[in-house]
Amino acid sequence: MATSRSTKTSKQLTVELMWQLQRLGAPSISPDGAQAVCAVAQPSVKENKIQSAIWLLSTLGGQPRQLTQCGEKDGRPQFSPNGEWVAFVATREQNGKKDDEPQLYLIPPDGGEAQRAADVATGVVDFKWFPDSKRIAFISWVWPKLKGSKAQADQLKETKARKDTAYATEDAVYRHWDHNLPMNRVPHILILDIASGRVTDLLEGSGYELPRREPSANEFAISPNGKSICFVHDPDKAKNAAPRMALAEIELKGSSVVAVRDLVKNKDWDFAGPAYSPTGDQLAFLASHQSLKHTQPSHLALLEMQPQKATQTKKQGTAWKTISAHWDREPQAPLKWSEDGSALLCKAEDKGRQHVWRFDIATSQSTVVSEGGTVHAFDEAAGQLVTLMDRAIHPGRIHVMKVNESGQVASSDCKRIEYFNDDLLDGIALGNTEEHWFKGAEGDDVQVWLHFPPGFNKTKKYPLLHTIHGGPHTGPGDVWHWRWNYHVFAAQGYVVANVNYHGSSGFGLKFLDSITHQWGQLELQDMEACTDWLRKKTWIDKGRVFATGGSYGGYMVAWMNAHVKPGKYQAYVCHAGCYDWVGMFSDDAYGWHAQELGGWYWNDMQKVHSQSPHAYAASMKTPTLVIHGAKDYRVPDSQGLAYYNTLKAKGVDARLLWYPDENHWILKPANNVIWYHEFFDWIKRHDPALKKK
């Protein structure tokens, strides 16, 4: 299948133009289905920052309207259930007070001035409305032993006044991606009463907390009657570097806590994404049988809710069951019930695309409701489904579609309700994006996405540029990638290949799990098979082949440098790549190393080294650009520096691009522009055709 855009002019997609495009956030639909609201981010390379505002979109065909004007980072908008308010998270200055931490703001959808809903000293991470529209449940990082908002505020003030920068902890989980977790603080669920502004910590003194890695509103659900909140928690309280989560429930009377009790807990399973049914008599959630293997997918699961007495503290019965075990795709949070309670809506990957699916509970049948590209977010109300979806040939767009009584959507009922980037993209020539398959490792069919330069002509020859995805358990394909934009690369004159090698997600558990305990083996066979297959094409110049990758893709190009005969690839680019699995133990995900590699390094160094590029450094001879950010805690920058230093010590042509203020990704506009140009310049420097000129 090919997707394309007509090449009206010779104007090409540049990184500078890409950074002028607006970036759309997840939509929230109004209760009557007539409107949707989303955050729209506007980057600026000149200012080196990204600002965002809340926009109101009509599902009936009206023009989008900017709802907020004064904030710089307005985000996460949600309609109230009665449709009278839009709540969002922002850091602003209002009534002479500047927010030190993100706060909740409210604005009527008809317009007006946004008002701070409360002053929460410890800030707001994410939130959900109660069904009565009078209260909001939100997440904040608090000191668990303190009682009351004033004590929290006083402690925060004292902490910020400290002159030292020491970070002390005894927890196994203490940093994530690019930041240390707030020292001595944990994420709790709090309630804000809109009318009074009163804030109540629901988990104060309970010993419970939300997961510490990126806590979000996906980790809790509010019952339809507003009397219960189910939430995800770590029973070991961050004492396990690879935790298995459980579910608990808060029983409420108004905004007061009656009891907090365990709901679903099993040391063999990991639970996530709770969602109450419309009647509240069932709880849906995600369940992964981790004791079988760490690569086990999440399945949809159901718990029949039983009425409990206020004095009952033990967990409800274990009468929960998985309902999607025969569906060889992995559902993702958030889960959303159909209005009649007969089905669950969710996102799931499928062979390089990501769709919205409908899983019918009675029949256990899954069907695609809204097809990708890549659907990043969705919401549904009043028989209207709104989605944020992109493809390789266009950035995110918001569509609305009617859902019939059987839960299906007719393609003719799908319409786009915004055109934010159309003027900028008008006249930009993009080549085709095509899905292909070839025979890879173990004789399996392996998918590759090819992105062609504008004006591609099969009678000519083009250089081949591999962009190897990270993960390894991801499966991108038909997606607009801001940091590794396939068509920005293709516009430079390359045929760009993105292989979903063994280990990629969206192709079933067997394919995903096939690389476990033997990293580098099958993936390399896939990469080599794809390169050989493409080099036979008359339109590929087999003497101009390059391989690039980030994170696990960076690992792969380092692995290829050690295992592929020099000269087959003219140069590599290794962005945030894993290089030494022993040194990688300083990362924020060290708890999963033994599960992926097959052993801890102190118990089986031979096994670990057999999968580590650094152990084969003697063979590395191909020129490499190494890129890394100092704030990368997923793949610490010592990995990139060690790889670069090794290449220099060996006399291999190498260049280092290092950012003191970036993380696993290069996110700041000016930094990202430099990233692309360094990337292009390195490839061109080692392109034999350009050397001859």
Image: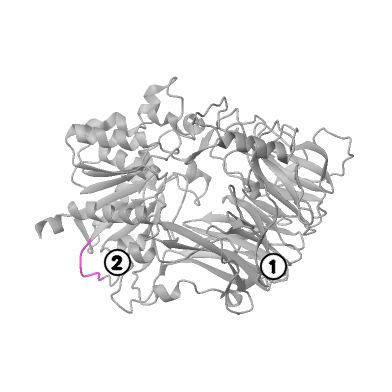
Point out residue 574 in the picture as x, y percentages from the top left corner. Answer: 31, 44
Going by the picture, which residue comes out furthest to the left?
A: 692
**Image position of 161 with respect to 674: above or below:** above
Q: Main secondary structure of the magenta part?
A: loop
Residue type at numbered disc 1: Pro
Q: Residue at x 50, y 52 (%)?
A: 506
Numbered disc 1: secondary structure: loop
Residue type at numbered disc 2: Pro
Q: Which residue is mark 1?
A: 108
Q: CA distance from mark 2 to mark 1?
A: 46 Å
Point out residue 424 in the picture as x, y percentages from the top left corner. Answer: 40, 73
Q: Are marks 2 and 1 in contact (CB under 8 Å)?
A: no
Nearer to me, 638 or 245: 638
Numbered circles on residues, count: 2
Res 74 seen here:
yes
For label 2, the crowd category at 10 Å Cα-Cα, with few meaning under 14, some 14 to 19 and many 20 or more, is many
Point out residue 301 in the picture as x, y percentages from the top left corner. Answer: 69, 46
**Image position of 379 with respect to 608: above or below:** below
Going by the picture, which residue comes out furthest to the top?
A: 603
Q: Picture quarter containing residue 472? A: top left
Left or right side of 48 for 678? left
Q: Which residue is mark 2?
A: 453
Q: Residue at x 18, y 53 (%)?
A: 685
Q: Residue at x 66, y 61 (%)?
A: 78
Left or right side of 520 for 277? right
Tell me how the rendering is colored. one colour
> Which range of residues does the magenta coloring cover?
457-462
